[in-house]
Image (cartoon, coloured by chain):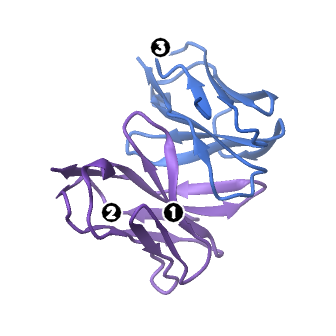
Chain colours: A purple, B blue
C-alpha cells in the first residue's frame, strides 16, 4: 500500500545551520507530495507541495524536489532559524473520493540560538 | 478567528465510557476529515465527509461514529472506549476535497485510563 517514511528525530541544530529531513515514499500511482509543519500548540499547516516528478516546492526558505527515480521528497533549508523549531510531516496525497493524505511519522526539529 | 477548531483539547476518561469530540470550521469548506495520530506519531485518516456525506471510511472499529449535522461541523463519537484509543485526534477541512491543502485543528489528546 501507499506509505511514507521519514527521518527519525529529534533533530537538533544550531541557528544558521543547513537542514535536511529525508523522506521517501511508496505509492502505486503518481501522488502529489507535501510537507506539513506543526508549530507548538497548533494544527498542521501546509509548508510546500509538488504535484509531479521534478517539481520543486518552496516556501519560507524551505525547498523539496519530487524525485520519482529515488521516490524521495527531502526537505532542505540553507539557514535555519529558532522560529523553524516544529514537527515536520512528509505526506503523499491520493484522490479517493476526497483528498486522502498518507503521512510519515513526523520529525521534531529544534533549533538552538 | 480559528479556522478549524476542535473541542476539547484534552480528554481524560475511563475505559468503557462514551465520549465525543467536536469540530467546526469557518472556512466555508465542503470536506472535513478526522485523522488519528498514534503513539509513534503516525497520522492516519479515519473518515472524510463531503457536504455531510461520508466518502472515506478507513478500517476503523465501528465504536467510532462520525456525525456531520452540516458541512461546517464534523463530530466524532466514540463508544466503549478502550486503552488503545488513546491518541491525538485531528480534525481537518479542505475545499471540495480535491485540493491538496488541508487545514487542521490543533488536536484533541485523548487518554483512556
Query: Which quadrant holds residue A39?
Result: top left
* Residue B57 screen position, x and y as percent: 72, 44
Q: Is residue A28 above or below residue A60?
A: below
The residue drawn where x is 64% and y is 76% is: A30
Q: Give the CA distance from mark 2 to mark 3.
A: 34 Å
Residues B13 and B103: in front is B103
Between circles 2 and 3, the one closer to the viewer is 2
Q: How many marks?
A: 3
Query: Residue extending furthest bottom?
Result: A69
Label 1 marks which chain's residue? A
Residues B98 and A61: in front is A61
Q: Is residue A15 above or below residue B104?
A: below
Q: Give the CA distance from mark 1 to mark 3.
A: 37 Å
* Residue A95 screen position, x and y as percent: 72, 61
Residue where numbered disc 1 is placed: A48
Q: Give the CA distance from mark 2 to mark 1.
A: 18 Å
Question: Which numbered marker is on residue B83?
Answer: none
Residue where numbered disc 3 is placed: B13
Residue where numbered disc 2 is placed: A7
Q: Is residue B58 above or below residue A61?
A: above
* Residue A66 screen position, x and y as percent: 51, 77
The residue drawn where x is 38% and y is 63% is: A6
**SS at circle 3:** strand
Q: Is residue B94 above or below residue B108?
A: below
Q: Is residue A21 left or right of residue A82?
A: right
**SS at circle 1:** strand
Q: Are marks 2 and 1 on the same chain?
A: yes
Between circles 2 and 1, the one closer to the viewer is 1
Q: Residues within 10 Å of mark 3 (few under 14, many from 20)?
A: some
Contact between labelled residues 3 and 2, with CB atoms less than 8 Å apart: no
**Earlier sequence position, callout 2 versus callout 1:** 2
Q: Residues within 10 Å of mark 1 (few under 14, many from 20)?
A: many
Amino acid at each position: 500500500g501507499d506509505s511514507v517514511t521519514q527521518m527519525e528525530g529529534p533533530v537538533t541544530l544550531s541557528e544558521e545551520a543547513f537542514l535536511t529531513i529525508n523522506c521517501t515514499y511508496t505509492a502505486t500511482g503518481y501522488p502529489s507530495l507535501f510537507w506539513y509543519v506543526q508549530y507548538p500548540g497548533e494544527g498542521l499547516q501546509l509548508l510546500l507541495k509538488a504535484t509531479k516528478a521534478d517539481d520543486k516546492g518552496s516556501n519560507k526558505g524551505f525547498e523539496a524536489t519530487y524525485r520519482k527515480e529515488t521516490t524521495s521528497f527531502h526537505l532542505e533549508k540553507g539557514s535555519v532559524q529558532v522560529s523553524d523549531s516544529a514537527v515536520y510531516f512528509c505526506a503523499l496525497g491520493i484522490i479517493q473520493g476526497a483528498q486522502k493524505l498518507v503521512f510519515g511519522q513526523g520529525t521534531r526539529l529544534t533549533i538552538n540560538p | 478567528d480559528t479556522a478549524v477548531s476542535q473541542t476539547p483539547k484534552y480528554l481524560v476518561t475511563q475505559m468503557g465510557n462514551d465520549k465525543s469530540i467536536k469540530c467546526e470550521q469557518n472556512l466555508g469548506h465542503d470536506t472535513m476529515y478526522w485523522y488519528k495520530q498514534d503513539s509513534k506519531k503516525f497520522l492516519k485518516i479515519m473518515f472524510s465527509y463531503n457536504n455531510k456525506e461520508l466518502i472515506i471510511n478507513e478500517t476503523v472499529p465501528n465504536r467510532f461514529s462520525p456525525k456531520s449535522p452540516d458541512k461546517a461541523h464534523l463530530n466524532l463519537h466514540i463508544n466503549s472506549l478502550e486503552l488503545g484509543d488513546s491518541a491525538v485526534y485531528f480534525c481537518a477541512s479542505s475545499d471540495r476535497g480535491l485540493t491538496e491543502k488541508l487545514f487542521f485543528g490543533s488536536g484533541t489528546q485523548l487518554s483512556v485510563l
